[in-house]
Image: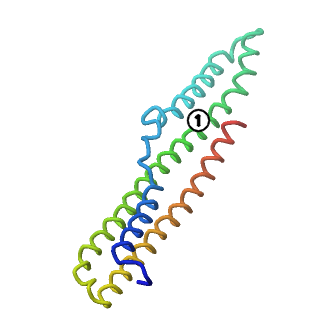
Amino acid sequence: TGGVSVGALVQQVGEVLGRGHALFGEPAVSGGGAARDSGTGLATAGDLVRTGQQRISGLSGALPAGYTRFAVDAGPTLNAAADADTALSNNLRDSAATDRAGRQTSGSVVNGAASDTAALAPSTRTAAGQRALISALRDRLAQQQQVINAHQARDARLAASIQRAGNVLLA
């Protein structure tokens, strides 16, 4: 083990795996029902504006003309905001689900390393047993790195999608 005891190596690997696991927090519910339903409220407002425009279209005067100008601007804007808000809400929900999945997978790696260590510990009195444990722990470190890399890539895609939805809302 190159001057490091097997026990110290196991401890170091456990710490590294633990830090990797800590990258996956326990995400919030992402606003819950309020966040999921906010796009619906905006879409309903757009429908009300259009309905109001249809009802007032047969009238004459300043108020119907002013409301028609308002409706022509507000209706499509409310619909675009509703679509962007729905996309944002879906992305936030997907982000939270991805983080939960990453945390679960990472936890499985940590638990697997603990199981490997427990199973191979009795054989570490021999060089072959030490090599087997070191190999198993290297595999777990590589597995944890793959989990982190996969979720970093997924997070980057979701962040870009959220940013696009946010830009539509701000436009």
In the figure, is residue 1 to the left or right of 118?
right
Q: Where is residue 46 in the image (x, y as percent from the top left)?
A: 60, 28
Q: In the rendered view, tell whether residue 106 sits above or below residue 95.
A: below
Q: Which residue is drawn at 68% across and 15% down?
A: 58
Quarter of the rendering occupied by the C terminus: top right
Q: Residue at x 74, y 10 (%)?
A: 60
Q: Residue at x 58, y 23 (%)?
A: 48
Dividing the picture into quadrants, the one containing residue 156 is: bottom right
Quarter of the rendering occupied by the N terminus: bottom left
Amino acid at the residue labelled 1: Ala
Q: Position of residue 70 (x, y in %)?
A: 72, 21
Q: How is the image coloured?
A: rainbow
Q: In the rendered view, tell whether residue 88 sits above or below residue 69.
A: below
Element at label 1: helix
Q: Mark 1 points at which residue?
A: 82
Foreground of the two, 87 or 76 = 87
Q: In the rendered view, tell whether residue 101 sits above or below residue 50.
A: below
Q: In the rendered view, tell whether residue 42 sits above or below residue 5.
A: above
Dividing the picture into quadrants, the one containing residue 166 is: top right
Foreground of the two, 162 or 51 = 162
Q: Where is residue 83 in the image (x, y as percent from the top left)?
A: 59, 40
Total of numbered circles in the picture?
1
In the figure, is residue 97 to the left or right of 156?
left
Q: Position of residue 167 (x, y in %)?
A: 69, 42
Q: Residue at x 47, y 40 (%)?
A: 30
Crowdedness near tag 1: few (<14), some (14–19) or many (≥20) residues, C-alpha within 10 Å: many
